[in-house]
Image (cartoon, coloured by chain):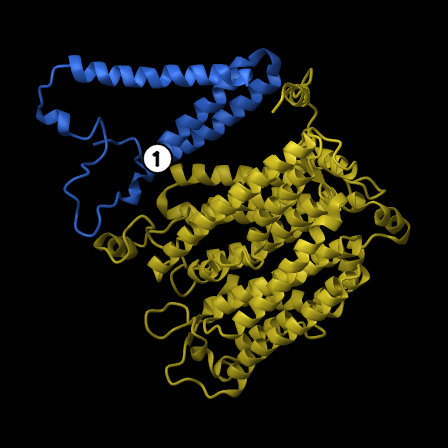
Chain colours: A yellow, B blue
Amino acid sequence: MNHAAYSALETTLAAPVITQGPPDIDYGLLSPMLVIFAAGVLGVLAEAFVPRARRRVTQLVLALGAVLLAFVLTVSLVGALPADGAGIVVAFATVAVDRPTLFLQGTILVLALASLLLIAEHGQEESSFAAQAAAVPGSEEEREHVLAGSQHTEVYPLVLFALLGMLLFPAANDFLTMFIALEVMSLPLYLLCGLARRRRLFSQEAAVKYFLLGAFSSAFFLFGIALVYGYAGSVNFADVAEAVAGGGAGVIANGEPLLLAGIALAGVGLLFKVGAVPFHNWKPDVYQGAPTPITALMASCTLVAAFGALLRVFYVPFGGSVWEWRPMMWVVAILTMVAAAVIAVTQRDIKRLLAYSSVVHAGFILTAVIAASPEGLAGAMFYLAAYGFTTVGAFAVVTLVRSREGGGEAGDLTQWAGLGRTSPVLAGALGLFLLAFAGIPLTSGFIGKFAVFEAAVAAGATPLVVIGVLSSAVTAFFYVRIIVLMFFAEPAEEGPRVLRPGGPTGVVIAVGVAATVFLGVYPGPVLDTMLPQPAEAEVAGEAPTDMFAR
Amino acid sequence: MELYAPIFVLGGIGAGFVVLSMVVGAIAGPKRYNRAKLQAYECGIDPTPQPVGGGRFTIKYYLTAMLFIVFDIEVIFLVPWAIHLDALGMFGLVAMLLFLVNVSIAYAYEWRRGGLEWG
């Protein structure tokens, strides 16, 4: 680098970071995240000082109370936003509080509440978590802990810390905050994946795989951030958007390749978290190996948070170069919808199948990202909420169907044959969730697919939508195959043992069914709150960067 | 290029110091072996002989690792704050105190879980 370029960089770097006097931070707007963080910290203190026998109750009350309070605060913040639909930036413009942020945060909190209920389920069987995760699987020490009834109540603070990351991830307004949110979200999840009570080596393998691949993807994301910083001279989304719109009036002359490489690398990091092909390889293994309540948390909350961040990054800072990233997204979306649907057909394990189904759904939501319009944003957000409720309900059903020997979950689909005759209500609920995944009318899945495909067609991505419809036809085949297996096949000789849904799991399944039907029959109120009003749509249509101001 | 000169000079001095002290130690130092010199340095487990099936560290060392991270991270953030104490003012002081409270909570967990019992 020559001297002139260096001094140019120096002037950018030397911009005053510290202002005179105490900075003005509106803590009220950050309150949902602060509540969750405080509850996580209190949870660690409870681990240290509350007697062992009372820890579980303490943690449960703390976690559920905090999530509920955070949800109430999130809803109350909607009224605090300016009436014209604009957003507010908080804390040195590192966090953006706007309508999409609050919608996604509210969705994440409700889904987290459902996942917490599954984590807490302790009724007729032991919990889903290892008695002592540090003990070697199969060792004498492990047996001692199982007999003594040890349990890791650290699960609750870990979930709260992960939740903090998930709330911050879609709200981040600069790349560094987003990266920190990504890590805060991911690190507890890596750990939680390895805590399964049964098939522990399998669970630990899943955790190591997730950790290694996740660390790589974080590195890609960070490298992308560095290149974008080199191009724009700032990590703030508004500044990057300005530099991109100005055609590279940034730090370095002719910096276009820096920007393109930066978009690609940051995109890899985000697409990994979303689980799009070819960055999906972790998903089946991790979803299968992790304790099922944690799988439910990852399949719903993490996906919502990751897509929220993806939408913000590609709509706000990279919104000006939509023509550059769109072809790349086309390729990823087509690969995701086609490859994952084809591989899913061959799956024999229910959790792996739901994992591949999650990959296919990520492909459908990507078509809305490609639309790069307010309708695309609204469609993607509706899809995420609808899919989140359905998938939490589906994994709740999975936790109840146990194999005869060992008491672990009956993953193998052959064991599910004839379930509709032995326990019709449970099979009926799962059948409804599968129909929603397939996108049958009168379920939330249909409205979600309709919303994202409509946005994609409006943006001129008709071929993509044709592929999407064909792909959903393929996925409908294997969803319907499970329904046929459950209701029309003879029950297996050694059929599974079906647990009666205890209080928490029953509530989760009921909420999943209710949300799937309600959003399918009467989606109007939810969809309308997200779509821009006609007067605003003109403004938003002109400048893609204003979409999040809605 | 001249901007990087101090870095190269510093690197050169560092490498020179290592080479010099090793060479001087090898030439001038007395060599009297005893049992203590062959043990693991200050802490840790004996690397040999390895147990059957691989000789892994037990995962319970996480408490030790946590202790390291608690104090390591604390110092890393304390130093730049201390240097710019004047500019950061009361806001910086409160922020740093909040940070220290949070770090001490990890320390309290560590202490209650027996991470400080070295017996």
The answer to which of A204 and A146 lies nearer the viewer is A204
- The answer to whether B72 appears left or right of B114 in the picture is right
Estimate how packed mark 1 is, as few (under 14), some (14 to 19) or many (20 or more) residues with alpha carbons within 10 Å: few
Image x and y of residue A264, in percent: 62, 47
State the image quarter where residue A334 is shown.
bottom right
Image x and y of residue A383, in percent: 68, 61
Taking the spot 69% from the left edge, 72% from the top edge, the residue there is A469
Q: Is residue B15 above or below residue A216?
A: above
Residue ID for mark 1: B65
The answer to which of A326 and A471 lies nearer the viewer is A326
- The answer to whether A237 appears left or right of A64 in the picture is right
* Label 1: chain letter: B
Taking the spot 74% from the left edge, 49% from the top edge, the residue there is A322
Image x and y of residue A539, in percent: 87, 46
Image x and y of residue A136, in percent: 27, 52
Residue B118 visible at all: yes
Q: Is residue A356 above or below residue B29?
A: below
Q: Is residue A57 above or below residue A385?
A: above
Secondary structure beneath dot 1 equals helix
Taking the spot 18% from the left edge, 36% from the top edge, the residue there is B46
